[in-house]
Image (spheres, helix red, strand yellow):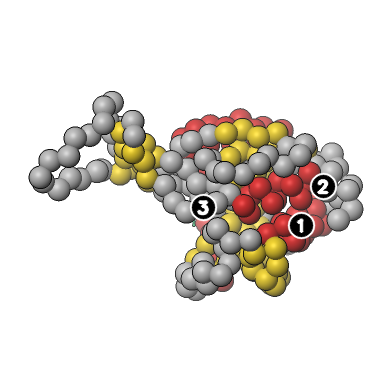
């Protein structure tokens, strides 16, 4: 890509899973590897942007020239993201944020008994929707991982969360997405006149997909 396509732009990206503590040794989480978000950070940096990468717990090296902020829980990611977007041009919510967290975090390791147990869960904040709702919201891009009716749910999310763009993928195809090196997506975005356009991104490396998403965003921003 041209090294100047995003020069002068500050991009904030969330990546990876979050962990929601149950007690000091246990948590709820998901299988997100963080690879797509890290690929976006590396591509944005190559295209000349200043990049802040807010990462949940992942096993990935920080891309060169990227400012990385490590977080664990959704609440921490929410705080870090809202702080980082204050002077951002683009926000990309690529993290697989846990939708719920245990209402109580036990101070000590919970002991097992012969009975079952119940954990009450409460909703986490929606980081992407909260960023998009800011008065001075950056150009906001979300991700939608769906197992069915991908286009329908993605466009619903675009409208409901007031996003500028959404990248949707079908996670029922286990050869792409999550821990895979490749991805395939459909991009939906809102034009200035509010009509929704779409473009299919054929199966390619997460790095190539990241570049195409950012090129489309750069086009819409200019
Ligand atoms: O509603 P759903 O979780 O499917 O939306 C996915 C999109 O929203 C992703 O871009 C994800 O990063 C973002 N999200 C978020 N905070 C949440 C839940 C999802 O930023 N609590």
Expressed as whole percent of the image width and height from the top left, the position of residue 216 reads 77, 59
Evaluate if marks 3 and 2 touch, with contact meaning CB atoms under 8 Å apart.
Answer: no
Which residue carries the number 2 mark? 46
Task: Please give left or right for residue 165 compared with residue 78 in the image.
Answer: right
Which numbered dot is residue 164?
none
Which residue is outermost to the top?
A: 107
Expressed as whole percent of the image width and height from the top left, the position of residue 65 reads 77, 36
Which residue carries the number 1 mark? 211
Task: Please give left or right for residue 122 compared with residue 188 in the image.
Answer: left
Q: Which one is earlier in the sequence, the residue at label 2 or at label 1?
A: 2
Evaluate if marks 2 and 1 touch, with contact meaning CB atoms under 8 Å apart.
Answer: no
Q: Which one is earlier in the sequence, the residue at label 3 or at label 1?
A: 3
Looking at the rendered structure, the number of numbered marks drawn on it comes to 3
Task: Please give left or right for residue 186 compared with residue 127 in the image.
Answer: right
Which residue is outermost to the left?
A: 114
**Picture residue at 57% right of the left edge, 34% below the top:** 70
Task: Please give left or right for residue 217 compared with residue 72 in the image.
Answer: right
Which residue carries the number 3 mark? 32
- Is disc 2 surrounded by few (<14), some (14 to 19) or many (20+) residues within 10 Å? many
| On-image quarter of the N terminus | bottom right
The image quadrant of residue 159 is: bottom right
């Amino acid at each position: 890509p041209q090294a100047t396509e995003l020069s002068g732009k500050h991009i904030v990206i969330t990546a990876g899973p979050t962990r929601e503590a149950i007690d000091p040794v246990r948590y709820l989480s998901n299988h997100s590897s963080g690879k797509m978000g890290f690929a976006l950070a590396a591509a944005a940096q190559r295209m000349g942007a200043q990049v802040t990468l807010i990462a949940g717990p992942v096993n990935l090296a920080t891309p060169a020239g990227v400012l990385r902020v490590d977080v664990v829980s959704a609440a921490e990611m929410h705080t870090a993201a809202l702080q980082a977007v204050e002077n951002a041009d683009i926000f990309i919510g690529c993290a697989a944020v846990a939708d719920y967290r245990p209402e109580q975090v036990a101070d000590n390791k919970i002991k097992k008994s012969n009975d079952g147990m119940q954990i009450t869960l409460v909703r986490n904040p929606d980081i992407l929707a909260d960023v998009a709702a800011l008065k001075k919201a950056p150009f906001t891009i979300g991700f939608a991982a769906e197992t069915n009716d991908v286009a329908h749910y993605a466009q619903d999310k675009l409208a409901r969360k007031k996003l500028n763009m959404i990248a949707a993928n079908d996670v029922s195809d286990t050869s792409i997405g999550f821990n895979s090196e490749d991805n395939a997506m459909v991009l939906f975005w809102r034009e200035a006149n509010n009509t929704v356009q779409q473009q299919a991104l054929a199966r390619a490396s997460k790095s190539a997909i990241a570049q195409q998403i950012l090129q489309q965003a750069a086009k819409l921003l200019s």
